[in-house]
Amino acid sequence: MEGGRDAAPTGADAVFEAAWAGFEHPSFEPSAAAFSFAGTPCRISVADDDLARALLPAISRRHVAALEEHPVELRVWSGPFPGLRPLDLDARTPSTSMTRTGDVVSVFDPTHRNLSIYDRRERRGVWWTESLDAIPSWERSAPFRHLFHWMLADAPAAVLHAASVGTDVGGVLLVGPGGAGKSTAALACVDAGWRYVADDYCALRVDETPTAWNLYGTGKLTPSSAGYLDGLDDARIEVRPGDDKSIYDLGSHRGAQVTEHLALRAIVVPSLSPTPTDPIPLAAGTAALSLLPSTLLQLPGARPAALAVVTTALRSLPVFSVGFGPDRADAPRQLARVLAHAV
Amino acid sequence: MASTGSLSIPADVVSETFDETTVVINLANGRYYSFPAEATTVWRGLLVGEVPAADFTAWALAEGLVIQEGGSPGTPCEPPLGIAVFDDLSDLMLADPIHDVDYDGSGWATDASA
């Protein structure tokens, strides 16, 4: 297809308009669907079915039948984008670049040839990729993270690199670096019948009480982690060559347990250890070290809002460290003890 | 040692204090820090224009947590006052870094060399 315009757009506003207009190419057969993310209504229009099949399964649990007025509008398309200047910059900027001016904020990934760009005043955004094949597996399992981060800042909410599960008592937020046991613990809790909000990324709101909100029903898991749930292998929706993780549709496999939101009772800093260790109260500053840097560094562009949301949660919730042993049943047992301590 | 007015905290450096512990994050390079009580006191003083001790100032300059008008970045040295330094996310930044890029002030990454 031809791009949205022939002349090179200059400046963030012009690039946004080019990206927005590029969706209107006559070769596209777009479809639109309504969603709600952390209480924010959102209409997502996708240029073709292949792109929809690649990106929308991950957010299918957040589909709603009808939208309130004035939803956030997102457009998603792929194809050549003549004149998109960051494409010229690969040699000198071989890294993800983020720009912002006025109301427009963007992140461009030259490696995977995709652009997230959002106009905060107009509450509309575009996710563009040069080709369907260039979409990395993590984007398929957790798409539109930057756009969600920017559009939810008004809620106010922050998109976190954190897991969240819970019971009727309430939820826990599991924070820490990759490999700390967040996904493993979350899946073990699902296996034990707990409610599931996230195993990797969720939204956090702090209206009256800190609340974790589901964004994605998919997880990107190693086969060993996926083995925690009987039958999850049947919910595997993609394996990419050379990738040690596959994408699983937890929403379809355990849809009844995928919960839109959980009122949080505690923050947990997990670790994997040879034997399980009892929950130990931690200072908020310790949890902050596990949560603030990764949140602020991964998702730029709305950092003041994210900082305020996360800081409020850290100051209002008890924090515990928990060591999960090798038995997968340890995690729900230990986290039930955290909830008993916290409530 | 710098005078009171010559030290400032870059926009890329953010901090939050929880009880007596302050978490300081340098968004420019992904390094972050845990300041215990005494270092928190010094940092709070710095925020309101007080002059830190020379060893703290030298270290903070070297880490890019403060900048000195007309001064040099400083020489790397051991962190003072029991400050813990974390660079595990710096590796992440190197693998998949995000930089604010605005070469010409238009708000877009236009190529100045083109």
Image (cartoon, rainbow, N blue to C red):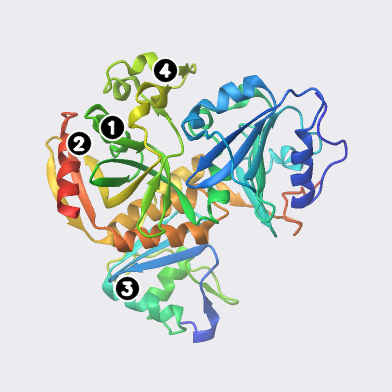
Of residue A202 and residue A295, the one placed in the foreground of this image is A202
Give the mark, 2 or 1, whose residue is nearer the N terminus.
1
Callout in the foreground (2, 3): 2
Of residue A150 and residue A298, the one placed in the foreground of this image is A150
Q: Is residue A201 visible?
A: yes
The percent coordinates of residue B12 (x first, y second) are: 53, 62
Do dots 2 and 1 share one subunit?
A: yes
Contact between labelled residues 1 and 4, with CB atoms less than 8 Å apart: no
Give the mark, 4 or 2, whose residue is nearer the N terminus.
4
* Residue farthest toward the right in the current orientation of the protein: A7
Instruction: Using residue A243 as the reference point, say whether residue A113 is left or right of it.
Output: right
Instruction: Using residue A294 as the reference point, say whether residue A32 is left or right of it.
Output: right
Instruction: Using residue A125 as the reference point, say whether residue B35 is left or right of it.
Output: left
Which residue is tagged 1? A184
What residue is at 49 percent from the left and 35 percent from the top? A62
What residue is at 34 percent from the left and 56 percent from the top? A289
Amino acid carrying label 4: it is: Arg
Contact between labelled residues 4 and 3, with CB atoms less than 8 Å apart: no
Which residue is tagged 4? A236
Identify the image quadrant of the C terminus of chain A.
Answer: bottom left
Distance from Cα at disc 1 to Cα at disc 3: 36 Å
Amino acid carrying label 1: it is: Thr
Which residue is tagged 3? B39
Under circle 1, the secondary element is helix
Q: Which circle marks residue A133 in the picture?
A: none
What residue is at 63 percent from the left and 40 percent from the top? A94
Chain under callout 3: B
Which residue is tagged 2? A331
